[in-house]
Image (cartoon, helix red, strand yellow):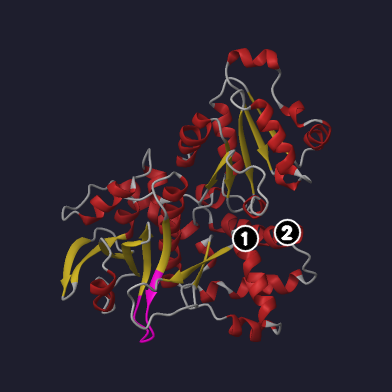
């Protein structure tokens, strides 16, 4: 069983400070397994799933009944893992009471689907009592390295002229991730047939179960049609008008459905970076899928895989207190574009262009390097064994294999 990097951060940042840990993420990304792995490191603990009738009855009567017996606590500080507890009515109020009474005596880990992220907003009675983490699919570094890189360590490695040492395991990890995705079940099964069955079942459950619970949309079949249209639009500017025409529904309806799919961690959108970009786009974003294997076209799938690795690094570094990291892209009205820009504490930090095989620096680098000025500019390719500098009129661009770049991240 592969260790998840997020487990160490939960223990060191949340539990060490006597705070609860909330872990949200896509369906079947490994949240329950993460909770069980952390629980397995404790001498005393309990796993409680809301879908179990015994858990529901105990929670309704007295949430403290789910805690390990006091006699068992002599063996160490217990851990209570609450899975899908956000399905309970007034769950935040009950959890607040449990935490306030047991603070410092019991560690609490709350895991759940993307709805956990939705419901924690608003009148948050738990404010100051928890830290929120986002669990992403597996990445190259998580498969081959024992710990994630720090932001400074990553930028130093990418900014170095020297070629980093890379093991064959990183190349193999990248190839299997590009083919099967980063969700545990299809990744470790490494079977095309099982991956197709898993993918179909996951999409159906996200829409037929999670979306049904989150919203009151009567026409779920139409939302399934929307989900089927998204893979072919990955990496392109998102046109709600085009989707509206294909689905024959109102513009606001498509926008609302897309918002639900983002809330459910099915898709995510990145926005253009505007500061310092003359004639920049203002509103249009680009859409990517959490499971990039739904994308058939090779170049678009590779770009989505790159987006997934960069988004994971941004979320992990933000959630663990390294700074505020956000993912954008660069594009002006002359249609010059760089696929990704990581912004660190509101300053351009790492620009990344994704090319399936082309090692010649994109002409678009000249339009943005001098004006935006990221610390490092990288053009990643799927080809293995690439790592060299290219100097343009406006600055240095590192052209490198995706496996080598991703091994330096999270």
315 vs 402, left or right, is right
Mark 2 sits on what residue?
Answer: 214
Eyeballing the image, is 128 above or below 61? below
The percent coordinates of residue 278 (x first, y second) are 33, 81
Count of numbered badges drawn on the protein:
2
Q: What element carries label 1?
A: helix
- Residue 353 is inside the magenta segment: no
Mark 1 sits on what residue?
Answer: 263
The residue at 25%/72% (across/down) is: 369
190 vs 228, left or right, is left
The percent coordinates of residue 123 (x first, y second) are 68, 51
Eyeballing the image, is 169 above or below 365? above
On the image, which quarter does residue 355 sit in?
A: bottom left
Residues rendered magenta in the picture: 329-337
**Viewer can see residue 176:** no
Q: Crowding at label 2, few (<14), some or many (≥20) Cα neighbours within 10 Å?
A: some
Label whose residue precedes the other's in the sequence (1 or 2): 2
The residue at 43%/80% (across/down) is: 281
């Amino acid at each position: 069983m592969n260790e998840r990097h997020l487990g160490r951060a939960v223990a060191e940042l949340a539990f060490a400070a006597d705070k609860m840990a909330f872990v949200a993420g896509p369906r079947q990304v490994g949240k329950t397994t993460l909770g069980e792995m952390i629980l397995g490191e404790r001498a005393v603990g309990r796993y409680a799933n809301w879908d179990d009738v015994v858990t529901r009855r105990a929670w309704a009567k007295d949430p403290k009944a789910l805690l390990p017996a006091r006699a068992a606590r002599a063996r160490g500080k217990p851990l209570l893992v609450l899975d899908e507890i956000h399905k309970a009515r007034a769950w935040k109020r009950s959890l607040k009471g449990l935490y306030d009474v047991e603070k410092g005596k019991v560690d609490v880990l709350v895991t759940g689907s993307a709805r956990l992220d939705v419901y924690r907003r608003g009148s948050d009675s738990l404010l100051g009592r928890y830290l929120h983490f986002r669990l992403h699919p597996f990445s190259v570094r998580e498969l081959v390295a024992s710990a994630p890189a720090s932001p400074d360590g990553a930028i130093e490695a990418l900014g170095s002229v020297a070629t980093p040492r890379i093991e064959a395991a990183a190349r193999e990890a990248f190839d299997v991730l590009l083919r099967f995705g980063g969700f545990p079940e299809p990744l470790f099964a490494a079977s095309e047939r099982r991956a197709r069955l898993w993918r179909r079942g996951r999409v159906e459950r996200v829409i037929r179960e999670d979306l049904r619970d989150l919203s009151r949309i009567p026409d779920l079949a139409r939302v399934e049609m929307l989900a089927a249209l998204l893979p072919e639009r990955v990496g392109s500017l998102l046109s709600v008008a085009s989707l509206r025409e294909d689905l024959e529904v109102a513009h606001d309806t498509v926008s609302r459905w897309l918002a639900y799919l983002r809330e459910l961690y099915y898709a995510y959108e990145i926005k253009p970076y505007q500061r310092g970009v003359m004639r920049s786009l203002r509103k249009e974003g680009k859409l990517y899928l959490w499971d990039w294997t739904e994308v058939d076209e090779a170049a678009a799938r590779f770009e989505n895989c790159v987006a997934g690795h960069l988004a994971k690094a941004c979320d992990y570094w933000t959630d663990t207190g390294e700074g505020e990291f956000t993912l954008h892209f660069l594009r002006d009205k002359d249609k010059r574009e760089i696929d990704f820009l990581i912004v660190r504490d509101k300053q351009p930090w790492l620009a990344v262009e994704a090319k399936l095989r082309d090692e010649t620096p994109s002409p678009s680098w000249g339009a943005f390097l001098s004006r935006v000025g990221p610390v490092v500019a990288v053009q990643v390719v799927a080809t293995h064994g690439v790592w060299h500098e290219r100097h343009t009129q406006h600055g240095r661009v590192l052209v490198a294999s995706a496996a080598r770049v991703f091994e330096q991240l999270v």
